[in-house]
Image (spheres, grey):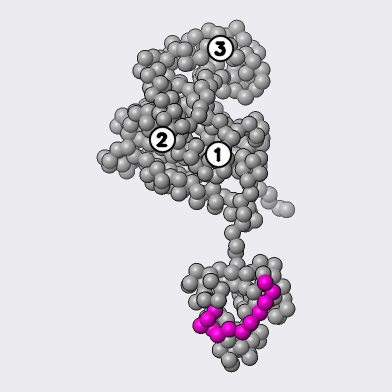
Amino acid sequence: MIVSIPKGTKDILPSEVHRWQWLEDAFRDCCARYGFSEIRTPIFEHTELFKRGVGDTTDIVQKEMYTFELAGRSLTLKPEGTSPVVRAFIENKLYAEQMPAKYYYNIPCFRYEKMQKGRQRQFHQFGIEIFGTENMLADAEVIALAMDYLSGLGIDDLSLRINSIGCPNCRAKYKDALQNFLRPELELLCDTCKDRFDRNPMRILDCKSPSCKEITKNAPRMMDYICEDCRSAFEELKENLTALSIPYKIDTDIVRGLDYYTKTAFEIVSDKIGAQSTVCGGGRYDHLIEEIGGPPTPGVGFGMGIERLLLVLDAAGINISKPETCDVFIAVLGRAPMAQALKTAQSLRASGFKVLTDVMGRNLKAQLKYADRSEASYTMIIGEDELKKGVVTLRNMKESTQKEIKLEEIEAEIR
Ligand code: ATP
Ligand code: MG
């Protein structure tokens, strides 16, 4: 091997791509049922967008971005999906259209992270966003779509955790309280968290290291500091989830840890896929669109990791069957019937059949072997005799029967 695949990335091979397609089709259908439209944005953006959108103090911006300089510009491969959608919303003046705006996307994301199970450097996300309303009905709808999608896949043992992370009004007081609590333990925190102490202390609550978890066990929680407005929003969210019959747990450890993020934060978690257990993470960001230069517009959404979704499906033993790839294999015996074979193949394909023909000039025996390996439902043989009589020999591979039929009767026979 002269050049191998970069660490943290994976090929998705033809033998497994049907699993991805199945998830993607189901996601598209689900989003349509909730009235979301797809949006596609470029794979790279100006670095500044993520500094503003994700936040200068976050791990992503501090050390995980794939950033490169070209022609005097700093560009970055998408580490997440929300900021690019916000940029497109502003740049294309989509805010002038009817509100709320409801978008979904399916994107690759790039983060230079330490490799672990469920953590790659290029991974993929489904995401949705609702812009233009502060109403907790939107938060409930975002969560309902995620849960609906997952249960539609046959996954029903995931748990929904919700939290309120307040707003800039109530958060300042909380940050002080949290830093005061953590200060005496500062030396015992992991290196990443030492770093987070000044720039983004809330994120320490989110640390997966057992020693940090132990230290923060009794730390003050945002929930005890939220203002009246944030508290009543949280009550409304809970009522809406109850009305939707969606069970939830309150988990005061969930943080987004950024000033633009407000009120609702939630995660959907599996206990079957190891330490990287969050399949879906989302929440509200009422100041993000303004931060990126748009008119003040509230928003809420989620990002769902597709690789982790596949791990959950594996753990649950959900088998996604491979679709049939070949209805008919057309084998040709001799040179003369070739034109007829090609014509028949094209006409069957035009009618929607999956048709294989020999493109290697193999002899009949080898063609039939190939047909067998391709798991064709039918094999059709056209030789000189058949050509003269205007028929083909049609072999039903499952039943091991064969008969001669007229060209014009093929479709009716194999449908
Ligand atoms: P985590 O706690 O796992 O680091 P995060 O808070 O960084 O997650 P988000 O930015 O909210 O994650 O991304 C949404 C989802 O994308 C996550 O819940 C997860 O399923 C998935 N995800 C995030 N980072 C990775 C990665 N490096 N590899 C695979 N999936 C990922
Ligand atoms: Mg992360």
Name the residue tied to disc 1.
305
User: Which label is found at residue 141?
Assistant: 2
Q: Is residue 6 left or right of residue 108?
A: right
Examine the rendered structure and indicate whether residue 12 appears above or below residue 297. below
Tell me the element at label 1. strand
The amino acid sitting under disc 3 is Ala
Q: Is residue 339 visible?
A: no
Quarter assignment of residue 207: top right
Camera-near label (1 vs 2) is: 2
Q: Which residue is drawn at the image coordinates 46% and 24% (left, top)?
A: 258
Q: Which residues are magenta?
A: 399-411
User: Which label is found at residue 219?
Assistant: 3
The amino acid sitting under disc 2 is Glu
The first of marks 1 and 2 along the sequence is 2
The CA distance from mark 1 to mark 2 is: 19 Å
Mark 3 sits near ligand 1, with its Cβ under 8 Å away: no
Residue 271 coordinates in the image, percent (x, y): 63, 31
Q: Is residue 173 visible?
A: yes
User: Which label is found at residue 264?
Assistant: none
The amino acid sitting under disc 1 is Gly
| Front one among 323 and 370 | 323
Residue 1 coordinates in the image, percent (x, y): 73, 53
Mark 1 sits near ligand 1, with its Cβ under 8 Å away: yes
Q: Which residue is drawn at the image coordinates 54% and 32% (left, top)?
A: 268
The CA distance from mark 2 to mark 3 is: 31 Å
Q: Is residue 304 left or right of residue 142?
A: right
